[in-house]
Image (cartoon, helix red, strand yellow):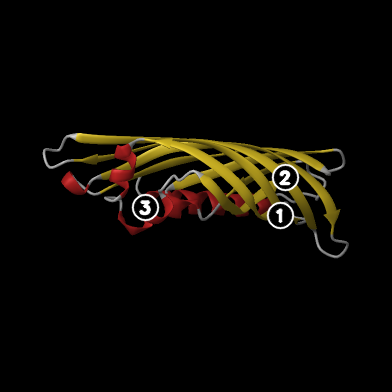
Amino acid sequence: MNNTSLRKTITSLAIILLLFVSVQSQDNKSNNIVKINPFGAFASAIPLSIERLFFEQSFSVVAGGAVISNKSGSGTTTYNNSGYAVTPEIRHYFYKDSQLPAKIYIGGFFNYEEHENLTLDRFEEEIIGTAIGRGGGLIFGNQWFFQNGFIVDFYVGPAYMSYQRTEEYDINLGKGGLLTSLTGPKNTGTKVKFGFSLGISF
């Protein structure tokens, strides 16, 4: 799946979410949420998450993940990458704005990733690189619960990731273009995790 197709897929999913919200009114006591990050296409990914709220909506469990797929170029300019990420998360909502449908929360998460990229040498032999990552961290965020079921979620927080990658993986990144060179490197260390998602409650 190339970047253009991925953007069309995410745009279509976002439109479906908005149409569903417009025809089915929900109240803010709904305890299930499905969300998508609309900016995922820029990283050749489709990030989805499902959240379940408990205890008068003061605590939640989130099952998140992303599917990554991109194919570009041909011959010696070929660059394909694929993979997935799984991110279980727990949240505690400790404040609700009395005027706005907003809830501030703190959460913790674990992240596991597997990535593979592929290029071709001048003899069109495949060069395959792999990277595996594990880590976790904390997030601080705000989630808006609107009466029609629409959800807006934003968070930021510190994280640590440890990666094991092959030499071929790093070499292949150089053939993936500017965006890949910025978003593709898998370096062990601390980072700032941030996210933005749109969704529906039901």
Q: Are marks 1 and 2 in contact (CB under 8 Å)?
A: yes
Quick one: label 3 or label 2, which is nearer the N terminus?
2
Q: Secondary structure at mark 2?
A: strand
Q: Nearer the viewer, residue 191 or 128?
A: 191
- Which residue is identified by label 1? 141
The amino acid on which the numbered mark 2 sits, given as a three-letter code, is Gly
Quick one: label 1 or label 2, which is nearer the N terminus?
2
Quadrant in the rendering for residue 123: top left
**Residue 63: x, y in percent?**
64, 36
- Which residue is identified by label 3? 180
| Residue shown at the point (33%, 40%) measured from the top left | 169
Task: Count neighbours of disc 2 (C-alpha within 10 A) and say few if under 14, some if 14 to 19, many if 20 or more.
Answer: many
**190 lies above or below 146:** above
Instruction: Compute the Cα span from label 3 to label 2.
Output: 29 Å
Q: Nearer the viewer, residue 199 or 17?
A: 199
Task: Count neighbours of disc 1 (C-alpha within 10 A) and say few if under 14, some if 14 to 19, many if 20 or more.
Answer: some
